[in-house]
Image (cartoon, grey):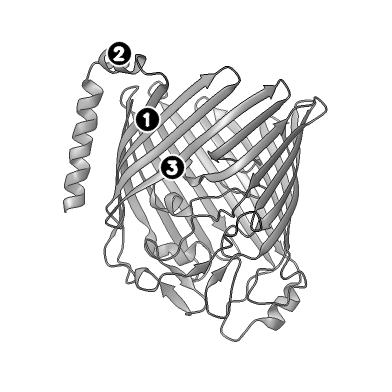
Amino acid sequence: MAEVTRFFRTVALCLLLSLASPASGADWRDDLPFDLHGFIEAGLGFRTQNDPQQSHDLNYGELRLQLEAYKAVDAMEFQFRLDLFRDEALHEFNADLREAHLLLTPTDFADLKVGRQILTWGTGDLIFLNDLFPKDFESFFIGREESYLKAPSNSVKISLFPGIFNFDLVWTPIFNSDRFVDGERLSFFNPFVGSKVGERLKMSSREPETFAKDAEYHLRLSKNIKGYETALYGYYGFFKNPGGFNLLGEAIFPRLAVYGASVRGNLFKGIGNLEIAYYDSLKDQQGDNPFINNSQFRFLTGYTQELITNLNIGLQYYLEHMRHHTRFLRALPPGFIAQDENRHTLTLRLTHLSFQQNLRLSLFTFHVPSDGEWYLRPSVNYKVTDALSATVGGNIFTGGDGRTFFSQLEDNTNVYARVRFSY
């Protein structure tokens, strides 16, 4: 296949670059008026089974170049990060501006960051309660590097450090949704169709897009209390993933407010965390509209510890409790799936480092007992040199009835490989 040929050509290029003298690369960058870094990466991933909703088995095939520039002048910092890539799965060239922001520090107790930036907060490991910043679930499910789960947003962030507590306010003038599964690359279950759909029947959506009127507001108050990181959160905006459907069958993003809190700190021989959030579905507070998500109470607790030298374990329990579940069932049209009142999720992360920490073995699993579904993310990463690394892994979806969150993605199960040369 042409994709495989291009992949191995890029691997050969990365090997040649890694053997080149690092001094020669440092010379020309020393003359630049800013710091320049980045990488070249080739990635390839194939489904392990036939997906009747997609025309080919390749769901991840990329040649990616990242350019990252940084400049600091007095109380100002500028960060720029751009990805240019060829996407073989969608047969297109693309660009993804990851960051382009200016950070100002006018005083010792205030920061102002303006522009395109990647933001995150909260205590969960790959589970997000009070982190309502955009996520890229397609990247996560096909095998891109884990950091690509965090998507950029065009925002203004104000941070104040008065001493009593820390204050962060983020204003996003136009709503930024998650990069969600829509059928173009990955198939999923569409309740309006009553079956799985893919590239021939992409999900159409209607996103809020009016400047200022459709803005998002994120708030965090945080304080370290005797070594424990505590925080209160607030959010006003919209469901980040489609939170309902209109009568045309288009996915919509209803109004949403979220209120939450978290604590994280030392516990026994490791680190424990606890986080809660209330999702207030402002367009369906009574819970009797079956086409808009009900309000929810969400709860997360976790624990991480180094079991033995270079072997770490992380465990989490996550609960989503639907409010007004009885009203939801009464209003549900015939043939539509009845969601459970309580959805329980268990996660496990195992990480082992060896060969002077150059070899990293990792496994992350999601298990939803009520739905009988599993999502497993095994990976092996080897650091060949300081500049060259290789990764192989998989995204394995199994169990369930093919209509729940993870089980609907079963036909997208894949294995992948990535090779990256950093400069």
Q: Which of 320 and 375 is in front in this view?
A: 320
The residue carrying pointer 3 sits among few (fewer than 14), some (14 to 19) or many (20 or more) residues within 10 Å by Cα, namely: some
Q: Position of residue 199 (x, y in %)?
A: 35, 68
- The residue sitting at 66% across, 45% down in the picture is 171
Q: Residue at x 83, y 27 (%)?
A: 164
In what element is the residue under mark 2?
helix
The residue closer to the viewer here, 270 or 123, is 123
Residue type at tag 3: Leu
Q: Is mark 3 on a helix, strand or loop?
A: strand
Residue at image coords 67%, 29%: 111
Assess whether mark 1 and mark 2 are in contact (beta carbons under 8 angstroms).
Answer: no
Counting from the top left corner in percent of width and height, residue 393 is at: 36, 45
On screen, residue 369 above or below 114: below
Nearer mark to the viewer, of 2 and 1: 2
The mark nearer the N terminus, 2 or 3, is 2
Gap between marks 3 and 1, in whole Å?
13 Å
Q: Can residue 171 be seen in this view?
A: yes
Instruction: Please identify the residue farthest to the right as the structure is shown.
Output: 164
Q: What residue does disc 3 label?
A: 97
Residue 155 is left or right of residue 202, and the answer is right
Mark 2: amino acid: Asp
Label annotation for residue 27 = 2
Foreground: disc 3 or disc 1:
3
Residue under label 1: 38
**Residue 296 or residue 92, whichever sits in front:** 92
